Image (cartoon, rainbow, N blue to C red):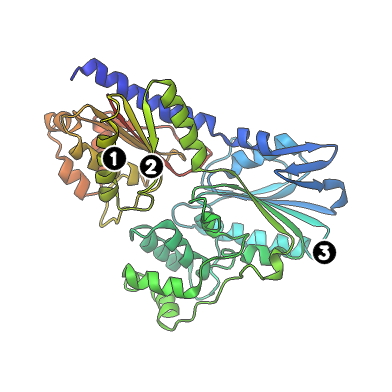
Amino acid sequence: MSPGHTEEIRECARRLFLDALNAASVEGAFERHVQCDRGVLRICDDLYDLNRYSHLFVVSFGKAAHSMLAALQKQAGDRFEGIVSSSVQPEFQVRGFRYFNSGHPTPNAESIRAAEAALRSLHLHSQNASTLVIYLVSGGGSSMLEKPLDNEISLDDLISAYRALVLSGCPIAAINAIRKHLSAVKGGRLAQAAAPAQQVSLLISDVPDSTPDALASGPTMPDSTIVEDCYAVAVKYGLLAQFPQSVRELFECRALEETPKSDDPAFSRSRWWTLLSNQALLARCAEEAVRQGFLVEIDNGCDDWDYQVAAEYLVGKLHELRKKSERACLISGGEVTVKVVNGGIGGRNQQFALACAKLIEGQRIVVLSAGSDGIDGNSPAAGALADGSTLKRADAQGMSAQKHLAAFDTYHFFHSLRDDIVTGPTGNNLRDLRILLNY
């Protein structure tokens, strides 16, 4: 294969990812779905006369917390006050808002303080129905706004429980089911604190469209999971032995408290709107790939699959697609799972890309996998590129792909090859994008 041609296709994959990321922007989503004219705020199909409310309060949390608040302010002005909690540093602070530098993927002390501040403010301002509470919710919010429901669970215990969940290989919906039932704010409990105020949630979603209450563990909407789900997940993934004693005892005694469901009065004056999701990334990527002359197919069938199984599935699908066209593009969204044991530096996207490198060795295939938030696991990269020459180039540097894969140390592997994709935090979070190109 021609090295020049390979580099051209590799660059094409990078451009497809970056173009999709730029097109699926938070600011653009607000421009399409949120407008304010003469004090009347339109959010999708709903209208709110802001002059009729005695108090306007905003709680913004997650990786897109700052960009969402900036977009709301651009559309509706600086008439709001509230709380912002994110692990991403703000470029500027909005007057009237308290800022918390919270943790991710595990909570920190600021995460707890942010949740306590939100609960206090909601109790204070929402005692009558003339308050409007706007929630700006994005991925990563589970760890950025948190307070244990049981006071026996310390911050260290909470961090240990989160770490066990994140490294377990559980699908995100299963992880969040447990988080909800341990939390004083998740699973609809933040909405309970705000009742009877008028409440509306604007969502930049990093979860499957079919389970919106999994986003940030659903603090503002009815919970579709039940305590029995938590007990089943803990058994299936062997979590009890990994949980700290304060959490383990709740499971062993079956003492988890149920979360509010759709019939709870807290939701009688609540609305939820998804402004942006993974589908926006996929649609834009597909549109541009068609323009570049590829035969395009989208396949999300491997969402929440183990990374190795997902790699085998998608490479196999690309082989089928390239029977129809030499220039084929397979696009996949969502997330794969990785059960990490004593891991190094990396994340699920780089783990997936390296698994693909073994499957496409010597072939005219390029694979890109990256996170829309710009952060893959505990690495500084968003993801990585692999092609048919990846293993050969690694061998030339004395690197063993198998050893890096087994050690979950994929960042150093791809960084050494200059195949890591680095964007920095994007202020967005729409799950992952995987692009497989045949040429």
* Image marks 2 and 1: residues in contact by CB distance under 8 Å: yes
- First reached walking from the N terminus: tag 2 or tag 3: 3
What amino acid type should be assigned to the residue bearing mark 2? Asp
- Amino acid beneath label 3: Asn
- Dot 3 corresponds to which residue? 128
Asked whether residue 426 is in view, the answer is no
Task: In the rendered view, tell whether residue 325 sits above or below residue 34.
Answer: above
Alpha carbons under labels 2 and 1: distance apart: 9 Å
Q: Mark 1 falls on what kind of element?
A: helix
Q: CA distance from mark 2 to mark 3?
A: 48 Å
Closer to the N terminus: mark 1 or mark 3?
3
> Residue farthest to the right?
52
Q: x and y percent of residue 401 in the render?
A: 17, 40
Task: Name the residue rendered at 16%, 45% in the picture.
Answer: 403
- Classed neighbour count for the residue bearing mark 3: other residues with Cα under 10 Å, few (<14), some (14–19), many (≥20): some
Instruction: For mark 3, give the secondary structure.
Output: loop
